[in-house]
Image: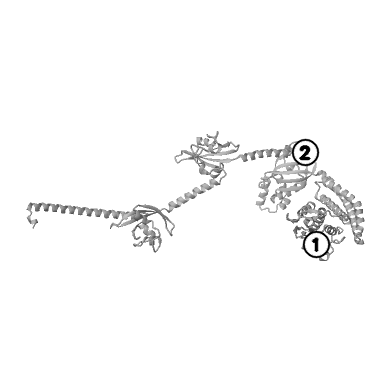
């Protein structure tokens, strides 16, 4: 053999080498075992660390199976048991359409992304790292950190920032945060819009450059003073356009107490300044008017009276009228609680005072028994929340005389809650009172004269009815016109004179004068109807719009307060071809009749519509209506159902309408109302 040919020395040498190799191999095996043990120890440490981490940790294989899951994972998702991730995490039967984890398998690079738990709505930050299994196969280490509190904090912070921005942007004041160099860092919407910019466009510019077109801070600028004093400051600045600005500066300090900037709050007070000036001038005018007014004016403070009334209510007094009636001393006490602020010159002249201090005692100085009775009613009005009270009363002058007065108590605007400012005016009606008795006597004689004339007219009506001859109307009209119009004109002038002279007359006197005026007006209407009916006056027909006819009526026939007027006269109606004066007279008759048919109030509707050749103009009331048996007699001369009048109004109206080429129709139901309809020719058909 070849080996047998070797020498012993060679064999020994080879054996020594073999032993050395064996020793080397044994050392390598020992190192490998040590390294294996170290690796296993490190692996155990890693998995122990992963097990203890407060984050969700698992190892995912390329086949989606979960090879390891720590305690946090198991508490959240249960034991994975080698199941695929899409079953454990997403409750799916098959892999997700796009699995982010596989990007780590593909790229071998770590990645970070966010995942929201499908049922617990918690948010996790997922950190994924490439990992190698013990057998060398690739895995991905998924580490999920619950960042829900952080997300909630961020959301709350964003909401707070949004609320802050919303609040500041809702302010009409200009708000800007500036750094120590007066450079704008942030501004609200109002500040930006004031110069036609957006808030981000203001950032980086100086406030004095933006709003005042200056290259340096304004003299006396409160923001500069805030920087210097590190305390809030305020002041006024006038911009180049003449507007006045109220500027406030508030220091902003850092964590260490150092100044880092100033919040500037600016408000345009130009209008306020103008208002203040106008108020000052108004106050001066008020004082001038107050002092120069010919009516006696008292400026009073009723706040103590108001408190006294409130105290009575709180103590259980419900009927203050009865209480004050039973306790007259309480009325006198309230009079003493009125605080006199001022009186004008007219008060001195009315009551015989020489200076305002003469009235230092207030109302008790001039009150008599009748004054206290009226003051009681005034207190009841105050308790009812009224801000105005009118009455007639008497008062004493400083020398013991008596005055008859019309008193008005009015609360000044803005003092409705506490009655701290009240104006009391006194109008002297003493002379009027003295003249009232004589006026009543004269009114009685005048009433007799009116009754006498009315009787004459009624007798004439009865004579006309009994004769039933229309031919007599012409002669009677001429005689009535001559015999009655002159005395009626005299009575009218006398009533007008009395109404002007006795402008402050009591209600009874005014009522009698109005009755006289109404009676005279009715008599004049009868005369006018007689004359119109007896004359054969041709119609001066011309084009006129129905709306123009309607306007004429309301100029002549002012509606009573208890009657509502509804006018439906479209402006696009065609004009009618009539005599405007005669049609006005017809409509006046119909509207007056409608008023009289609604003594308790109601609704009067005037409307019109057009056909091919005519315009239908109707006057409808909601009054008493006309009995069916009387409808056929309405347009007969001398027929009337009224206690006054001679029954010519509707007959005359019919005559005038027919003279203008039209006709008149009537519909009525008792208790429902009456509608008169004028059928008038359209102007273009007669051009």
Would you say the residues marked 2 and 1 are in contact, meaning their CB atoms lie under 8 Å apart?
no
Identify the element where label 1 is drawn.
strand
- Residue found farthest to the bottom: 629
Residue 335 in the image, given as x and y percentages of width and height: 72, 45
Residue 266 showing in the rendered view: yes
Q: Position of residue 269 (x, y in %)?
A: 60, 40
Q: Quadrant of residue 452?
A: bottom right
On the picture, is 184 further left or further right than 535?
left
Q: Quarter-wise, where is residue 579 in the image?
A: bottom right
Residue at the spot 66% in from the left edge and 38% down from the top edge: 280
Residue at image point 75% right, 59% down: 609
Residue position for label 2: 349
Q: Which residue is mark 1?
A: 665
**Badge 1, how many Cα within 10 Å: few under 14, some, many 20+?**
few
Q: Marks 2 and 1, Cα distance to the nearest angstrom?
A: 66 Å
- Near mark 2 (Cα within 10 A), the count class, few <14, some 14-19 or many ≥20, is some
Q: In which quadrant of the rendered image does the C terminus lie?
A: bottom right
Q: Position of residue 557 (x, y in %)?
A: 79, 53
Q: Residue furthest front?
A: 687
**Residue nearest the observer in this picture, 58 or 557:** 557
Q: How many marks?
A: 2
Give SS at disc 2: helix
Q: Quadrant of the N terminus?
A: bottom left
Q: How is the image coloured?
A: one colour
Q: Earlier in the sequence, mark 2 or mark 1?
A: 2
Give me the disc on residue 38: none
Q: Is residue 139 above or below residue 427?
A: below
- Which residue is at the front of the view, 331 or 202? 202
Drawn side of residue 54 relative to residue 315, left or right? left
Which mark is nearer the camera, 2 or 1? Answer: 1
Q: Nearer the viewer, residue 525 or 54?
A: 525
């Amino acid at each position: 053999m070849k080996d047998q040919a070797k020498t012993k020395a060679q064999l020994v040498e080879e054996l020594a080498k073999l032993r050395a190799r064996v020793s080397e191999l044994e050392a390598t095996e020992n190192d490998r075992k040590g390294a294996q043990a170290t690796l296993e120890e490190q692996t155990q440490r890693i998995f122990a660390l992963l097990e203890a981490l407060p984050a969700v940790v698992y190892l995912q294989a390329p086949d989606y199976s979960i090879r390891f899951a720590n305690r946090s994972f198991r508490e959240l998702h249960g034991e994975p048991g080698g199941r695929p991730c899409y079953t454990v995490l997403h409750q799916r039967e098959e892999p997700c359409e796009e699995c982010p984890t596989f990007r780590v398998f593909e790229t071998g690079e770590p990645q970070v992304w966010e995942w929201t738990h499908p049922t617990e709505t918690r948010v996790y930050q997922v950190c994924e790292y490439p990992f190698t299994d013990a057998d060398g196969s690739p895995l991905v280490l998924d580490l999920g950190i619950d960042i829900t509190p952080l997300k909630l904090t961020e959301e709350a912070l964003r909401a707070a920032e949004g609320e802050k921005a919303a609040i500041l942007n809702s302010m009409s004041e200009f708000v800007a945060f500036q750094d120590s160099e007066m450079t704008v860092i942030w501004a609200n919407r109002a500040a930006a819009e004031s110069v036609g910019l957006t808030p981000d466009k203001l950032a980086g510019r100086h406030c004095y450059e933006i709003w005042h077109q200056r290259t340096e801070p304004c003299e006396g600028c409160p923001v500069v003073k805030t920087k210097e004093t590190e305390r809030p400051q305020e002041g006024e600045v006038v911009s180049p356009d003449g507007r006045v600005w109220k500027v406030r500066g508030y220091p902003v300090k850092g964590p260490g107490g150092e100044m880092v900037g100033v919040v500037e709050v600016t408000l345009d007070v130009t209008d306020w300044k103008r208002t203040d000036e106008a108020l000052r001038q108004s106050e001066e005018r008020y004082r001038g008017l107050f002092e120069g007014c010919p009516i006696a004016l008292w400026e009073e403070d009723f706040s103590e009276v108001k408190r006294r009334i409130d105290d009575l209510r709180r103590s259980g007094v419900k009927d203050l009228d009865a209480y004050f009636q039973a306790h007259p001393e309480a009325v006198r006490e309230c009079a003493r609680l009125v605080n006199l602020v001022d009186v004008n010159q007219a008060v001195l002249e009315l009551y015989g005072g020489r200076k305002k201090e003469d009235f230092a005692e207030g109302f008790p100085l001039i009150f008599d028994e009748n004054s206290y009775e009226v003051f009681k009613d005034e207190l009841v009005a105050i308790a009812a929340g009224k801000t105005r009270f009118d009455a007639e009363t008497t008062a004493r002058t400083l020398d013991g005389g008596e005055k008859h007065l019309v008193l008005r108590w009015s609360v000044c605007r803005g003092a409705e809650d506490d009655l701290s400012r009240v104006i009391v005016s006194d109008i002297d009606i003493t002379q009027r009172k003295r003249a009232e008795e004589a006026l009543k006597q004269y009114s009685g004689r005048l009433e007799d004269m009116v009754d006498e004339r009315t009787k004459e007219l009624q007798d004439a009506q009865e004579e006309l009815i009994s004769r039933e001859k229309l031919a007599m109307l012409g002669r009677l009209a001429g005689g009535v016109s001559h015999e009655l119009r002159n005395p009626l004109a005299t009575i009218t002038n006398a009533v007008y004179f009395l109404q002007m002279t006795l402008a402050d007359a009591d209600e009874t006197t005014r009522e009698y004068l109005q009755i006289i005026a109404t009676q005279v007006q009715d008599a004049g209407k009868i005369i006018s109807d007689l004359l119109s009916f007896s004359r054969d006056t041709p119609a001066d027909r011309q084009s006129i719009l129905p709306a123009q006819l309607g306007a004429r009526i309301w100029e002549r026939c002012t509606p009573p307060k208890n009657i509502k007027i509804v006018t439906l006269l479209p402006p696009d109606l065609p004009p009618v071809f009539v005599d405007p004066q005669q049609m006005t007279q017809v409509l006046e008759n119909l509207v007056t009749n409608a008023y009289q048919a609604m003594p308790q109030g109601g609704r009067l509707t005037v409307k019109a519509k057009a056909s091919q050749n005519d315009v239908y103009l109707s006057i409808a009331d909601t009054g008493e209506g006309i009995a069916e048996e009387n409808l056929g007699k309405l347009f007969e001369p001398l027929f009337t159902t009224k206690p006054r009048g001679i029954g010519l109004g509707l007959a005359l109206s019919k005559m005038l309408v027919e003279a203008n080429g039209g006709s008149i129709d009537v519909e009525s139901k008792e208790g429902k109302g009456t509608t008169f309809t004028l059928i008038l020719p359209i102007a273009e058909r007669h051009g």
